[in-house]
Image (cartoon, rainbow, N blue to C red):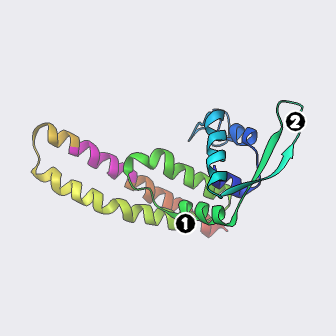
Amino acid sequence: MLCLVSESPSHGFALARTLSEDGELGQIWRVPKPVIYRALQRLEVADLVVTTELQPSSAGPVRSLVDVTDAGRRAAAAWLTKPVRHNRDIRSELLMKLALLDRAAADPVPLLTAQRAQLEPVAEALQVKLASSTGFDRMIILWRWETVAATLRFLDDALRDAASVAKAH
């Protein structure tokens, strides 16, 4: 929510549209309206967003236009550049970060590079464990190693794509 509001002042209804099943970012994260409004309230309590205007609406209640504060802008920027901690969160969190960077026409290479650096030691440690494991433990480690290896291949492809886009411009 914070990153979306930092793109431009918005209200919950517009954010809900963006994060709906048919919305631009709904293919990554689908967020129900009540969750969006609660998140906006929490962000306001944390002084990361502020209500700047109340807009009457013929389609429902008055809409509260929120804008990001300086602290919110810094927090959003920091989150966008921080690699995801766990491979299990790549599908949602990293893809959302990449989508938001794309919307801002920002270079994804620093994030992709940092994400690769975050996962390489995990892959190496799993490879070592795999060599000495047996039974069902081996199956679990093999699954984890294969998913991390697939993520590293994805990151390599994304880095190549980003490099070719940069060359084209």
Which residue is at 29% across, 46% downward?
146
* 95 sits to left or right of 41: left
Residue at figure coordinates x 67%, y 52% from the top left: 44
| Residue 2 in picture, x, y percent from top left | 64, 53
Q: Please name whichever residue, 22 or 56, is drawn nearer the observer in this view of the structure.
A: 56
- Give the residue displayed 50% in from the left and 45% down from the top: 92
Q: Crowding near pointer 2: few (<14 within 10 Å), some, many (20+)?
A: few
Q: Which mark is residue 57?
A: 2
Q: Residue at x 89, y 31 (%)?
A: 58
Query: Disc 1 vs disc 2: which is toward the camera?
Result: 2
Label 2 element class: loop
Name of the residue lying farthest toward the top: 59
The residue that disc 1 covers is 163
Q: Nearer the viewer, residue 9 or 140?
A: 9
Residue 146 among magenta residues: yes
- Magenta stretch: give its range: 141-151
Residue 106 left/right relative to 159: right
